[in-house]
Each structure stands twice: as C-alpha cells, then as structure tokens.
Image: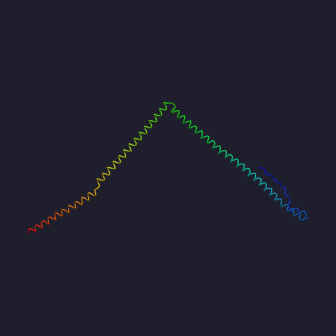
Amino acid sequence: PATTRKSTTARKPATTRTTANRSTTSRSTSRTTAGKTSPSRSTARRSRTTAVNETRQAAQANQRAAKTTAKRTGSIAERAALTYIGATLEARDRVVGTVTDLVDRYGNRTKAQRELVKFERRGTKARTQIERELRNRRRDAERLVRRNTKKIERDADRRPNVVTQRIDAVSTRVEDVVQIGVATGGRVVAKARETVLA
C-alpha cells in the first residue's frame, strides 16, 4: 500500500518568534537555539524514513505470507482431488479385472463345468483331511484313556487294601484269644479232674 508523505517543513517554535523582538544579545541565543533544533529535525526525518521502510517491509511480508498460504491451500485441495480420482480409477481397474477374470473362467459351459469339478475335488480333499484328522484325534484319546485306566488298575492292585489288612489283624487276634481260652479251659478242666479224683 502506498503511504502518504507529510510535508517536512516545520513551523518555527514559539521561542524563535519571541526572540526576534528582543535585542541582539538575544539573537545570538536564538541562533544557538536554532542550531540546536537542526539535529532534532534530522533525527525526526530519520525516524520517519525508518517508519516508512518498516511499514513497507511489513506490508511486503504480509503479502508474501498471503501468497504462501494461498499456494498451500491450493496444493492441499489439488492433492485431495487427485487422491479421490486415483482411488476411483484404482477401484474401476479392480472391477474390470474381476469381471474379466470371471468371463475368462466361466465364459462358456465347458469352462464353468471344469471349474465346478475343480471345486468339488477341492471340497472332497478338504473333507477327507478333516475326517482323517478327527479319526487320529479319536484314536489318540482312546489310547490315552486305556493307558490311564490300566495304570489306575495297576496302582489299585499294588496298594495294600487297608480294610482287608485290618480284618485279617482282628481275626488273628480273635483266633489267638480263642486258643488261649481253649488252652486255659483245658487246664482248668484237668485241674478239676485231678481235684475230683484225688
């Protein structure tokens, strides 16, 4: 944007006007005052120039940023559109390829029958494989059950039967007690005879 330039001629300060009416001694004072104001004019000029330059540079930077943003936005929109078009074309190519493949495979009756026979063979093969695997698993399970059953029976036969052992011990004690009782009874009877006969 263009900037308007202000006039650089400044008004004389109020001190200068009042000193013109005074004597010559005051003229020399006004000259020194005027001499002192010149550097401030150049400083003001420099400040204005710097401000104008900075404003111009800021405007140019804003303009560049706007152009860059516009380019990026356009690039993003273009990429999105191209991506959509590419995906659509890829999908179309796949559909065309699938249809072409189906026509090649099942184009006439003999080709279709050939494919059906191929599918049937494949299905039969898969069924046979599954049946074989199931038979093997069943056989392995039966073997495991038989092996574990035999092992349990063997362990049961090897372990002493606690109840049978206790019954045997009790019957042995009873027999001992009965034998002692019979022997004692025999002695008592023998002594009683002796006493009766004597």
Q: Camera-side residue: 113 or 82?
A: 113
Image quadrant occupied by the C terminus: bottom left
Q: Camera-side residue: 157 or 14?
A: 157
Task: Name, please, the residue furthest toward the front.
Answer: 196
Question: In the drawing, does residue 137 fall left or right of residue 76?
Answer: left
Q: Camera-side residue: 140 or 15?
A: 140
Residue 158 x/y as whole percent:
29, 54
Question: In the drawing, does residue 185 fall left or right of residue 13?
Answer: left
Q: With respect to residue 169, does 100 lie above or below?
A: above
Question: In the drawing, does residue 97 fall left or right of residue 41?
Answer: left
Choose top left, top right, bottom left or bottom right for residue 92.
Answer: top right
Residue 176 x/y as whole percent:
20, 62
Q: With respect to residue 7, does 178 lie above or below?
A: below
Residue 81 x/y as whole percent:
63, 42
Question: In the drawing, does residue 80 fall left or right of residue 178?
Answer: right
Choose top left, top right, bottom left or bottom right for residue 161.
Answer: bottom left
